Image (spheres, rainbow, N blue to C red):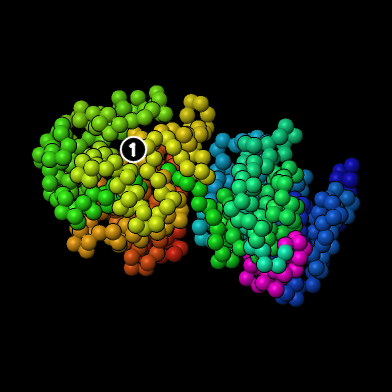
Amino acid sequence: MLRRAVYPIQSRRPLRDAVLFASWKGKACTDNPLGIAEALRRRGDDREHIWVINDYSTAAPAGGRVVLSGTEEYFEALARCRYVISNDDMAPYFRKRDGQVYLQTWHGTPLKRIGFDVDRPQFASGTAYFDHLASDVARWDLLLSQNPFSTPILRRAFRFEGEICEYGYPRNDILHRGEPLVEQIRERLRIPAGKRVVLYAPTWRDNQFYANGRYRFDLRLDLERAWQVLGPDHVILVRGHHHLANDVQPGSRRDFVINVTGYPDIAELFLVSDVLITDYSSAMFDFAATGRPMLTSLYMRVGSETKTFTVTALLQLVDRKKIGLDDPIARYVQGVPDGTAITLRELADMRSGLYNYTNDPAWQEAFGRNPYRQWLPRQLLAYSFSHPLMFKPGTKFFYSNTNTILLGLVVEKVARLPLATFIKRYVLRPEHLAHTVFPPGAQFPAPHAQGYAGPSPKGPLVNVTNWNPSWGWAAGAMISTLGDLRNWARIVATGELLTPATQKQRERFLPTGIRGVRAGYGLGLFKDNGWIGHNGSLPGYQSLTIYLPSKRATVVVLVNSDINYQGSELTTLLGEAITKIITPHHVYYLPPSPQG
């Protein structure tokens, strides 16, 4: 009634020079709107600041006053404030007047699909969200962007053609000047002095909601085990996303776990936290400003990055004078087409001419029929060997998993050890890569990320976490973590496990000859614009591990999906975006290969 009666009347009255702030649709007075309000006050702005709230338990920030959503005062402010600043879409009945300025700050770095980029919405509101979003975007005068990475994504995802202000995120100002507040915040949360603070802040899932439309909190942290490992000198803060229903359970140890979902400002929680555990992209980028550690180290399948380990194992045997790179594969493995003409070097360089078994239609049909099947190396090779040699060995580049399967068999024959054992004993253990695993089958250490593939006839996404990667074996079966791969990037790129002579041979990166691909490939590694490393992809997962020796820079990207975007792997796009920022003169980009 008030909306239909008061709002139209107030909309005919003159605008006044005041600012209306809306944060999380009135749930709090925080985030970018608060950062802007505080900056205005520091600069001497004396305009009236009015905050939309959903209940009177929410206090107004210093120098401002609150209006309760749905009241007469609220509709008067909505109609007459010259400036409207919000970090989310406004109520559908909001009608921007001539002379009003609507600044949309949004509320996170888009390391996921947002807005109209969500092509298969699973929201509680369904596709009706898009209709409301389009109506709201049409009213925006300005859109805030936090960095060059986000600007083009925000423009595309919201289909916004107006001015984008790439100024950074005001909500992070407190992380650079809020140190004096730390003791006050700890006292407010009743965290005893001396206790280390772990903040657990998972994201929300748009397909996990109750019948009433509220999103469900899905706790994936074993709090009892955490207590056993961390002990009484730690406290865990559990922060549910603001979209979630109030069903975050703190567990039985009240002095160890504190539910801070209702705490007004997550930035203050960042200030008192020693470490963050999250899969929430917004939290990752904001917390990075503190310089403190973040744990996103779930175990992930790394696909073809396995090749870097297998070829390193092979080169260690070269250093021991057990084999030579110019030895023919026929000396170690029988039945290889033209095996006397193909050398180990050509296999490691991807220049053997052998057909890639994963391209074989019969293999693809068998894998699709039963993705849980346990494969043996010889079974995989049989699909390849049913095809003639594609070209004379050494004359062309062709990426083939068959090559690395054969090299794995060479290591086993010469070392008289299973490949997984050799890699663990002579590659992983010396470099303390304790969280890198070569599983015999579908085994997957915990905690691990769920892997998603799609689309498929069964739906937009398929959980393929437990599909058996034994089909990749020496070419693609391994598992690792962000931390281990960060170390491995430098180790493998600089040849820490090899003699200088062997490393020099590995650094002979030959051109692929593929149109549009500038990267060279050699002995299980590629080099692109100075970056040395490898990528990986298998159902449900993508990875990228690269190192730039001239800058001693490392980039590791792990994604729990194998779905490409506009023909490019997500890890390639992320690698490009990251290197544009950190090493603008050495931007990484590996275009899609026509070889598949």
What is the three-letter code of the residue carrying label 1?
Gly
Is 257 displayed left or right of 66 in the figure? Answer: left
Residue at left offset 66%, top offset 58% = 232
Q: Which residues are magenta?
A: 170-191
Q: How many marks?
A: 1
Q: In the figure, 339 relative to 272: above or below?
A: above
The residue at the point 33 percent across, 30 percent down is 375
Out of 577 and 132, give the one closest to the viewer.
577
Whether residue 492 is visible to the viewer of this picture, yes or no, is yes
Q: In the rendered image of this protein, does residue 155 appear above or below residue 384?
A: below
Check disc 1 and report the residue beneath it.
472
Dividing the picture into quarters, in which one does residue 421 lie? top left
Of 145 and 81, nearer the camera is: 145
Residue under the image location 81 percent in, 69 percent down: 63
Please name the predominant secondary structure of the magenta segment in the image: helix
Label 1 Cα crowd, 10 Å radius (few <14 / some 14-19 / many 20+): many
- The spot of residue 426 in percent (x, y) is 30, 52
Q: Looking at the picture, how far across and down is residue 265, in whole percent? A: 72, 59
Q: In the rendered structure, does residue 345 fall within the stretch colored magenta?
A: no
